Image (cartoon, rainbow, N blue to C red):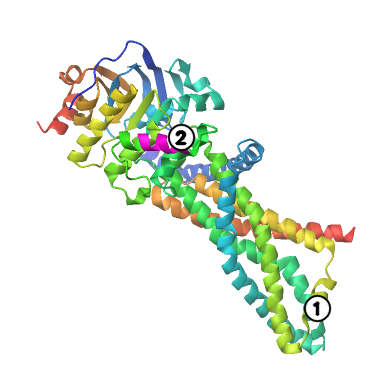
Amino acid sequence: MKGRSSETSSERPVSSRRYLFGRGVDDYFKGIANAAAFVGRFFKEVFRLPIHLREIIRQSYYTGVKSLPLIALTGFIIGVVFTKQSRPPLEDFGATSWLPSLMGIAIIRALGPLVTSLICAGKVGSNIGAELGSMKVTEQIDAMEVSAINPFKFLVVTRVLATTFTIPILTIFCISVGLLGSYVNVHQEEATGIITFFRGAFSSLSFLDVASSLAKSVLFGFTVGMVGCYKGFHATQGTQGVGRAANQAVVLSMFLIFLEELVVVQITNWIRLY
Amino acid sequence: MEKTAGPGTEPVIEVVDLSKSFGDLHVLKGANLEVIQGENLAVLGKSGSGKSVLIKLMVGLLKPDQGSIRILGQEVSTLGRKELDALRLRIGFSFQNSALYDSMSVYENLSFPLTMNVKNLSRKEVNLAVAEALEAVGLADKGKQMPSDLSGGQRKRIGIARTLILKPEIILYDEPTSGLDPVTCTEINELINEVQQRYNTSSIIITHDLTCAKNTAQRVAMLLDGTFPKVGTFEEVFTTHDPHIRDFYNYNFIE
């Protein structure tokens, strides 16, 4: 009896660890499968009627118009700061005339889409995660379901379309304001005229740069909306779950945005080479 | 308080050998139940006994592991999305915490299911339907308010009004009196009876409030250990020596 007891106690932690590890792996793959099914459902539902145009416009207003002041301020500051930071190394080579060109590349290719989508991940993504999470835990999503309203179509499809349409527009706005901020600084320091500055800013850019920047912003917009909706739609455990959904919506969408940035830059560079 | 009489003989809800588990937790274990057209049936049971699960299975929010649920002659588990939605329009579901849409006003909460399900309604028709539903629950002047401005009892009433807007044949009430003071509970009980009289609905009232069950239901069903061992009139069910049922009765009526 004694021997048996000691044998059990020495084996239990190992089997328990194995069980927990196994369950963790199992949950991980289940999570990926659920997320894939959620994205798949979006593409199935997006082409079905009704369109809920009013809700898409309403969500676009909240995503787009309400984010404009923040994007404007951040974009302008980034334009000014990056120009200030880039000047000293160029001055060493007497190449400050390259500043407009450098800032054009930096803002249009990378900073504009990235900064806009990160701001939206924090502002819009967390809002979507918290709103849908709260609706989930207070049974408002179930209430839609039992009223014969498709909550996925009404809540998820409309929000994802809104972020996918508006974040590219916000990106163009952010790029414009960022370049304006850069121009203000360059004009102040080097007395460069506006036409010279913008001609310089666009001189090193190709169609591929602008297209890839826009494609990125569409992808980032889709990611912000989809991650926020997914996390909100799967919130559990009351108010704690709502907070977790909002938090995870921001963290995961930011991570995915950086990952997508890496992939898109790599693909763009391959296209550029061939 | 007056209970309505005269339920028909036709069953509108038939639950046969229904089972549902969540992991190792077996909530329903071969439950059988029938609701007759025009009657209010109260389902009583302890918290966590599976009462709410039962009505969520009825509207297809959950899938049963085994057994059958026939509502208005249709087998719920075999219905496709469109057929299930069509059936859901004939069933009203009043949630325990009302589940009002926070971002919408009371008027929008009521008009939303109507405009989403009934095409080509004029604004006047929607206004009339909302006004009628609000008047039925005695809150005709609350249309412009937001749910957060309402008291617990008013939220319950608006929740019931939202189910009435689609003129359902069956209403499922999930804990209609939970968290309310005795006076408001009495008002909600009266409202349930008024709704039954006015709209000739059949209802299941999920509750652990025996006063609510006694005042609103023609029959009560006691959910114990996943089945309904006792179904009958209030007096029939509680004239028993079963210690579980006696405990339930004694706690509610302080004997």
Q: Position of residue A47 (x, y in %)?
A: 67, 38
Distance, label 2 to label 1, CA atoms, is: 59 Å
Q: Report in which chain the residue with disc 1 lies.
A: A
- Residue A146 visible within the image: yes
Are the residues flagged by discs 2 and 1 from a single subunit? Answer: no
Say which mark, if any, is on residue B125: 2
Image-based side of B135 in relation to A85, left or right: left
Q: Mark 1 belongs to which amino acid? A: Ile
Q: Is residue A100 magenta?
A: no
Q: Position of residue B13 (x, y in %)?
A: 38, 18
Tell which of A260 and A79 is nearer to you: A79
Helix, strand or loop at mark 2: helix
Tell me the magenta residue range: B124-132
Q: Extreme front residue here?
A: B124
Q: Residue at x 83, y 60 (%)?
A: A208
Image-based side of A149 in relation to B245, left or right: right
